[in-house]
Image (tube, rainbow, N blue to C red):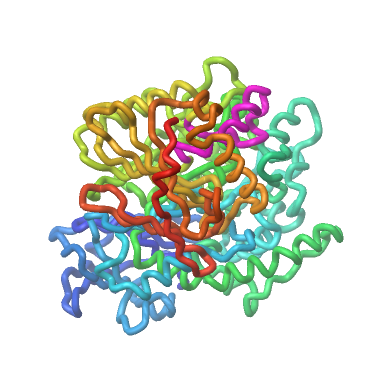
Amino acid sequence: MQVLAGPLLRRMTADRLTFWLMTTEPVTIDLTLLQNGNILSTLNTTQIAEYHTQLKAGDNLFIQLLDIKLSKALPTAQAIHYDLRLNDLDWTHWAEDLVYPNQPFPFFIIQPMITNILHGSCRKPHHPSKDGLLRVDELLQKTAPNDWPSVLMMSGDQIYADDVAAPMLWAIHQLIPHLGMPDEKLPCVEIDSAHKLHKETAYYYARETLLPENKLNRGMIDQFFGGVRKPVFTTDTAQNHLISLAEVLAMYALVWSPKGWELIFENGVISQPSGLSDEHKAIFSKQTPIIEEFAKGLPKVRRALAHLPVAMIFDDHDITDDWNLTAAWEETAYNHPFSSRIIGNALLGYLMCQGWGNTPEYFSTGLINEVQNVLNNPGDKNHDELLHQLFRFSKWNYTWQTSPPLVVLDTRTHRWRSEKSLEKPSGLMDWEALTDLQQQLKGLEAVVLVSPAPIFGVKLIESIQRIFTWAGKPLMVDAENWMAHPGSAYALMNMFRHNQTPKNFVILSGDVHYSFVYDIQLRGNKRESDLWQITSSGIKNEFPRKLLDIFDRLNRWLYSPRSPLNWFTRRRSMKVMPHKPETAAHGERLLNASGVSLVTLNKDGSPSEVVQMCSDGKDIHFTLSEQDATWE
């Protein structure tokens, strides 16, 4: 028996513990919890069975979720070691490097009061920067456990299903035969079997050619497979987009754990598939050492995720680029059986590998049974019926009852579609979802609100997005920001100004591949609510360096406090104070560095310190710049 991924700690409270794993065999589980060597609780196989759900995805692939309700609450703010035995084998048999030095078992700290929180988004394995999650492991190893962060919040793009390097896709195809998953019938003209896609004709660098070139399919190819060029930001490619459910599940195994890599490549050296053109061989060779270096860091990533509770929410790349950006995009993508299957497989993978552990109670036994039926016979009628059910699922958002509460928004499936044009960007949340959010926030003094996309963006970049939207080309520049849709923007601002919503909002966001911190004060608000937006992106991704430098300086010049352009583009009455990165040159406010953000909160829920723990080993503090305060 081998553990392909995990254990990942998910929602962990004093009376309820959630663990997630991938294994190569069905397992029976025993769990012992200890404090200072003394046993706090023991659950044998029989006792734990009612809290254990096991999904069989293949002959050698089993997804495990433990959602354990304890009869006696555990102590908080203290190290709780856990002895997790799988088929009577302890951690030394299935993850020998899982624990920190001088520790007998892995452990966790239940910190219901959020004093420190780690946050990041956008982890692309083939980006040349180092993996920011290695800084999480470093922090845990050098920090006294009682001072550990309460949670690691991963706010989107934990995988890139739509932007996969060929060495990674090749690794996925080497791992899939080890998993023994059933063949998935594909609704595709060119190839009708997932096994053929994995073995005979992988379509490396050419997956957009799987549909014949005709009028019916042209829109789907352009909008879904990413043949769209984005001249303002980057040229995104989906030539190696994940397609089958097996590819999605193998991807999760290969980004969270070293075990899959150990099974397929000797000494961590990636071989090269045959049949590549000279151009593609060159690209493959360039990306191979980056992927190999990524894989070498995974033992430390696995160790960190086995010690710190992890909250997750999807953004577009977990599923596909520009997911639900416009109503026209939705009509194109969901009304074609092949693109609908691709989107659905990624969403089903998200359910099993991310969403399930956030709030297991949201996913009924009936729904999980339907998932198992699809895993038994992928590609049949039940498969597509389940995917359409997931497209309508309304409980991806969730709240963890910490202090202050961690409220995580779904900004992808609750969209407020434009009333003016199918081509205009949809609002990130519709009226009903925003109304529900306001009701949830009433009476709270403080909240940590997670929005995958920044609520308050960089004005220059948002202006460029507006220009392309006006020209009917929102897909060209990823025109996804809260202010792109007037209805959702104004509803959100009115919620912030409501006299019964929290005094202190800390908004964690990502998505944009650069980091910045804003302190927003609402003008004329009797309660003087303050909002802090802390954007950290990416964990392993960055914005094109020269382009961001230009945007940053132009934004500072065009929208300075004394600029007439700033006066004429005020959103609502608010005072925006950027926190300057301590290493920034004059005129710079944006930080372009892979890593994760460590946020320290005061007792009232306001932030006292924000540090970007960069993947290159530097710690960059954000310092408040009062002279840059801007009425917007």
Identify whether 584 is placed above or below 424.
Answer: below
Report x, y in % for residue 418.
Answer: 53, 20
The image quarter containing residue 306 is bottom left
Quadrant of the snapshot with the C terminus: top left
Please say whether residue 82 is visible from this viewpoint.
no
Q: Is residue 60 left or right of residue 521?
A: right
Query: Which residue sits at x=81%, y=62%?
Result: 281
Q: Seen from this angle, which residue lies furthest bottom?
A: 102
Residue 143 magenta: no
What span is in magenta? 454-482
Query: Which residue sits at x=53%, y=31%?
Result: 563
Report x, y in % for residue 566.
Answer: 52, 30
Q: Seen from this angle, which residue lies furthest right?
A: 278
Please say whether residue 21 is visible from this viewpoint.
yes
The image quarter containing residue 65 is bottom left
Identify whether 465 is placed above or below 297.
Answer: above
Query: Which residue sits at x=65%, y=28%?
Result: 468
Q: Seen from this angle, which residue lies furthest top?
A: 420
